[in-house]
Amino acid sequence: MKNKKNTKRIIWFVLILVIVLGLVVPLPYYIESPGSAIRLSELIKVDDKADENPGSFMLTTVSIRRATPLTYFTKYLPFHEGVTEKELLGMTESDEEYENLQKYFMESSINAAIELAYKTAGESYKVTYKGIYVMSVLPKSNFSGKILVGDTIVALDDQKFKSSAEFIDYVKNKKPGQTIEVTYQRNGTTKTIAAPLMQIEQTNLPGLGISLVDHTSIETDIPVSVDSDEIGGPSAGFMFALQIYSQLTNQNLRKNNEIAGTGTISPEGTIGRIGGINKKVVAASKEGATIFFAPDDSIDPTVKKNYPQLQSNYEEALDAAEKINTDMKIVPIKNFQDAIDYLNKIK
């Protein structure tokens, strides 16, 4: 009798151990699933005032969680998808670099949203060039391990520039193997290092071996603050612009509606394609949105020929809405003015 009790205890112990390990041991794999729909009136203040009008503009997110041996199988659930570590991280080499990149995308989307909203509202603003933001570093670069994704290069050989184009032109006039001094900022600290330029294989031109974009900031006469918290990525730009614009102009654009959406935004107002829109439709519907703005991006005919199953964001959103049988209206938009025109017509 005693042996049977001990056997049962061992079985239970092993079973519990398997379950615990299955839930906590991380795999080099991630599960994407519907995230949340966040009301922007909780995140944005214009002229130090929150938006207290009825209805909401909501940004939508995709949840990304590292898989474990047990949660790995959730990828087979509706609107769940598994991605490898390499597929998720891309050119970045660590979770930290990936997070830095997502923070940059969010910062850029906020700045673009502010610029567009203030421009459209006829309010003043000023864009300031901060330097070169490092998007990736080639493994063969002599700066690999020294300059990291997320750093901002502010000078070369003590010379500052007004755009990434000037930066590139300066480097082009050097020779491969020539030492260059790079001043950069990381976490508020400025450092300077020197290393030889490499020869870029595709062009045979000298280079640092990094991919880069302009890093800018924006200042406004009417203060605006955006608390993006733990949210990353570029896809909230369009909804940020709508929220800021409606507060700047004191327009009742929502008319008591719960309005969600997604899409990148350019300072010129073009709304760009994003990933995971089907999951965002699910998140918006669960939160009670009645309208969902989806980028109506155009797919190049050559790309469509090679990938006939490829859909626009709007088509993907329509399919997702049909699958979950939601009453939420999916609205296609190509630019910022499309959304304003649509909102002005609803009752």
Image (spheres, rainbow, N blue to C red):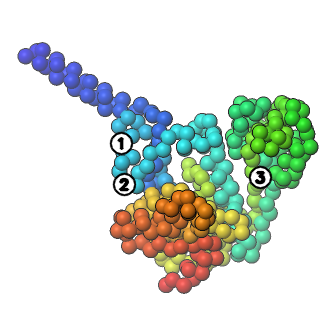
CA distance for labels 2 and 3 = 39 Å
N-term-proximal mark, 3 vs 1: 1
Q: Which residue is mark 3?
A: 214
Q: Which residue is mark 1?
A: 73
CA distance for labels 2 and 1 = 12 Å
Residue 266 is situated, as x and y percent measured from the top left of the image, at 69, 64
Q: Which residue is mark 2?
A: 78
- Which kind of residue does numbered mark 1 sit on? Phe
Residue 236 is situated, as x and y percent measured from the top left of the image, at 58, 60
- Which kind of residue does numbered mark 2 sit on? Pro
Q: Nearer the viewer, residue 329 or 77?
A: 77
Residue at 48%, 68% (x, y): give it: 315
Residue at 73%, 32% (x, y): give it: 140
In the displayed structure, does residue 267 sit left or right of residue 85?
Answer: right
The answer to whether residue 296 of the structure is visible from this angle is yes
Residue at 71%, 38% (x, y): give it: 137
N-term-proximal mark, 2 vs 3: 2
N-term-proximal mark, 2 vs 1: 1
Within 10 angstroms of label 2, few (less than 14), some, or many (20 or more) residues? few
Residue at 75%, 55% (x, y): give it: 217
In the displayed structure, does residue 286 sit left or right of residue 45?
Answer: left
